[in-house]
Amino acid sequence: MECKHIQERLPAYREEHVDLEEKKAIEQHLSSCQPCSRALHDLKKTDELIKKLPEVEPPAWMTQKIMARVRAEEEKKKGLLQRLFYPLRIKIPIEVFATLLIAVAAVYVFKAVEPQMRPVGPSSAPEQGAAKNESAEPFPGVSTDVRAPASKLSVQRPTGPAEKKEATRSADERSRAVSEEKRVDTESKEAVSVAVADKAPYDELRSQPVSAGKREALPDRAERPGRTTPSPGQEILPPGQHPAGLSFRQQESVAEKDAPAGELRRSKSLAAPVPVGSAAMERRQSGITILVRDLGAASKEIQRLLGRLGAQRVVQESLQNAEVFTAELQAEKIKELFEALKPVGDVKEKSGHTDISQGEIARIRIEVISQP
Amino acid sequence: MSNVLGEEKQVALDDDLELVGLCQKGELSAFEALVEKHQRKMLNIAFRMIGDYEAACEVVQDAFLSAHKSIRKFRGEAKFSTWLCSIVINLSKNRMKQMKTRWQREGVSIDDPIETEEGQIRRDPPSPEPSVLDQLEKKEIQAKVQACINSLEDEYREVLILRDIQGFSYDEIQDTLKIPDGTVKSRLFRARDTLKDRLKDVFGDL
């Protein structure tokens, strides 16, 4: 019992971790006890054995391997930002350049898109369209209405849902007009269906009896789509279509100025004397409606008049019971024209030319409607 | 000897702090210097803990990697070497556990280091001759001593290695193992006594 306790204390005794009293007691015991002094000897021997254990050397590749793993870990750990910017002197210039490039591209795209995005007032629209036509076609010719597509284009682009509603409405009106045409005339029905199928109805137009022999030659087919279809989805008005329907379309696209819907509907009927709805003209465009008894003679007369007054870009359009002339005329000559037209038939001026300043070129539209 | 080591550590502390500071700023070369400086000692600790050179090398690599990962958390409350050492010891203990479970699963090979619950060493009965030590090759003796160390329990083995093999001061052991001074000593004395008994079992008389 005594020995076991002593032997347990021996390591502490060796390290001098016993108080003086215990140390004396242990030493006393050791001197008399053989197994305990043997145990102390064994402890010393154990210590020697342990101390004799050689140190091992790390393999030569150890440092490299550790550092390789550390670097691999670093790479993995590197955040996205660090990876994006890491060699600053290389990547920063690249990034600056890329940013500038994007900025320039953005400005360029904006500039390219901007003109179409600008809301176009109804007044400037026809001018734009006219200018386009001028450059596209140097000589005047007979054509379907060019203004309508032009103005439609300028209004359709910038608007959102309102425009959509309007489009559906006009489509609705058109289809109604088509059904009306069916009832009235099979020939015109054909014409309408041709137009709806987006086949240019020029042959139809050509074959129709256009009043005067003085009429300008038709521009060839290839040229026409450029003029009359300035934007995709823009339909050419069929030649057989009713003038009122035509003017309704114009009016719709020009942003519904002042004609009540009821009047519009009335104006759609073929027999309607004067389509009041068509009074909604662009401001710079004078609209004149003449009710005549002899359509052919009146047309000839009007062609002659326009020629005399130096009208430019005369476009004659033959509709079923009407001839529509559009032309560009010196503003001061409009009054003269107006007076000269009075003997031809019952003249109604639909929109004034009062706001057209002197020297300016104005577009005029003359609808010659035969009156039974 | 411990005195000499103590002085060395004092110097090492200053160097390490500087290098550690550079490491925390992301200087890989500073970390490389620390690896160069400490790998030998860490390998020896791991080797004595595990008893297997290859495994010890892996443990040391893992320990340095882990130290690098968390070097920003090192605040200098303890010496860098002490901190590193605690990582090595913990990883070594984990490795021992893995190896033990693998041995248990796969069965024990005769080449494996002697792994005992006092069994295998005891099976080699003390020879009647006064001492076998003189008859054994140096390497064999070392292997057997290592085997006896391995047979110790973790808590005894670690203090014994740190104190008697690596010559750590009690304070350092306390810092490394995070146990109070009294526990360090009592474990150490117990470890020596146990080791002595194991060695006697292996070699007969010492």
Image: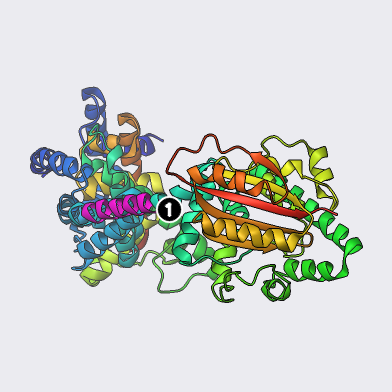
Could you tell me residue A319's position as x and y percent? Answer: 74, 62
Res A10 visible: no
Residue at mark 1: B94
Q: Please report the residue visible at 37 percent of the width from the left and 55 percent of the height from the top.
A: B198
Give the extent of the magenta segment.
A92-109
- The answer for which chain carries disc 1 is B
Q: Please report the residue visible at 50 percent of the width from the left and 64 percent of the height from the top.
A: B102
Quarter of the image that includes the N terminus of chain B: top left
Q: In this view, does A40 lie above or below B121?
A: above
Q: Please report the residue visible at 79 percent of the width from the left and 43 percent of the height from the top.
A: A264
- In the rendered view, does B122 fall on the left or right side of A176? left
Could you tell me residue A113's position as x and y percent? Answer: 45, 52
Other-residue count near label 1 (Cα within 10 Å), few / some / many at <14 / 14–19 / ≥20: some
Confirm whether the magenta stretch covers residue A101: yes
- In the rendered view, does A302 fall on the left or right side of B31? right
A363 vs A59, nearest the viewer? A363
A324 vs B159, nearest the viewer? A324
Displayed quadrant of residue A223: bottom right
Res A296 visible: yes
- In the rendered view, does B75 fall on the left or right side of B119? left
Q: In this view, does A82 lie above or below B140?
A: above
Give the main secondary structure of the magenta stretch: helix
Could you tell me residue B87's position as x and y percent? Answer: 33, 47
A85 vs B32, nearest the viewer? A85
Could you tell me residue A274's position as x and y percent? Answer: 77, 45
